Amino acid sequence: MNTITVKSPASVANLCCGFDIMGIALSGLYDVMTLTKREEKGISIKHIDKYNLPEDPAQNVAGVALQAMMDALQYPNGFDVIIDKQIKPGSGIGSSAASATGIVVAANELLGKPFGKKELVAFAMEGEALASGSRHADNLAPCIYGGLTLIRDTATLDIIELPIPPMYVNIVHPQIEIKTSYARQILPKEVPLKSAITQWANVAGLIAGFIKADYGLISRSLIDVIVEPVRSKLIPGFDEVKKKSLEAGALGGGIAGSGPSLFMFSENIDVAKAVEAEMIKVYKSLNIEYKTYITTIGEGVVVDNS
Ligand code: HSE
């Protein structure tokens, strides 16, 4: 096999209280990448999307991730890469993670799977670091493992795959861009103990709720007292969308990753449709362009055999 095409999913990191440690893969929203082995050394990247991302491999999230893998293998040849991004950069639903993970999964397949999932996350993290200025794996791990993942420790990549009960996921993406690096820069460096206690209680509650498929507990635990109060100010309509979504019956939700997208979990499709209608109303009234999606929790990067 010399050529492979993969679909690399969007993802939602943090899930309110789990800043930098939790994330889910989404179904039906993905980038498409085609990788071809070549004799000539190096990486050449071509984007066939509308996002004008750098094609210099050293400045491209996917290029940096692939280079990390090639360096580890001391790979003597090279790759041609074609990327069709569907996930808008700066949307909050893991655009850079989709680039970084899709390429390493694709290369690993082409090379006969020399690496396991954890090593793939480590290579992809090099790309994520270029995009956000920080090493975190909460979008990357669900793209590699699928479903819901917990990063207990980023330095050693202690990644735990967790069950999650069926839920619908609403996404609303107001068409503004928030750079992850900026959304990280504005966060407090220290946290009062009282807030920390609330936050770790909610993380524990949320994980327990997922494992027990206890929707009430999930709903009560989707609270972020540390990051959301700071970042939500960057997102027009945030408070209104959240309030109206909860009134429409959503279990809860908040900022998707570093924003500007918001996510909401719902137990059934009727509620998800009602939530979407409320999201649309808010952004129409604010005269802000938006995109909405109703999706579910999905698998990681898959080989596209179509
Ligand atoms: N956990 C990250 C953040 C996700 O919220 O900054 C975005 O890359």
Image (cartoon, rainbow, N blue to C red):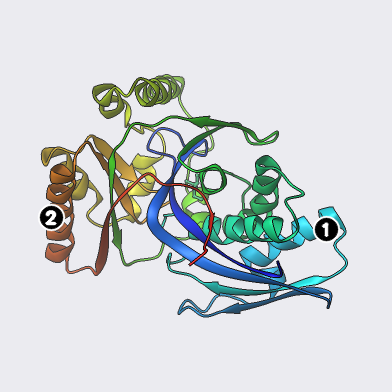
- Mark 2 element type: helix
Which one is nearer the viewer's eye here, 223 or 51? Answer: 51
- Mark 1 element type: helix
Q: Which residue is pictured at 25% across the width and 36% down the height?
A: 252
Q: Which residue is pictured at 58% across the width and 44% down the height?
A: 137
- Near mark 2 (Cα within 10 A), the count class, few <14, some 14-19 or many ≥20, is some
Mark 1: C-beta under 8 Å from nearest atom of ligand 1: no
Quadrant in the picture for residue 117: top right
Which one is nearer the viewer's eye here, 60 or 210? Answer: 210
Residue 168 appears left or right of 115: left
CA distance for labels 2 and 1: 49 Å
Q: Amino acid at mark 1?
A: Asp
Which one is nearer the viewer's eye here, 275 or 224? Answer: 275
* Residue identifier under label 1: 71
Residue 119 appears left or right of 176: right
Which badge, 2 or 1, is on the more N-terminal residue?
1
Q: Is residue 229 above or below residue 211?
A: below
Residue 173, label in figure: none
* Residue 297 picture location, percent across and down: 37, 44
Q: Amino acid at mark 2?
A: Ala
Q: Quadrant of the N terminus?
A: bottom right
The answer, for residue 121, to whether it is visible in the render is: yes
The answer, for residue 90, to whether it is visible in the render is: no
* Residue identifier under label 2: 277
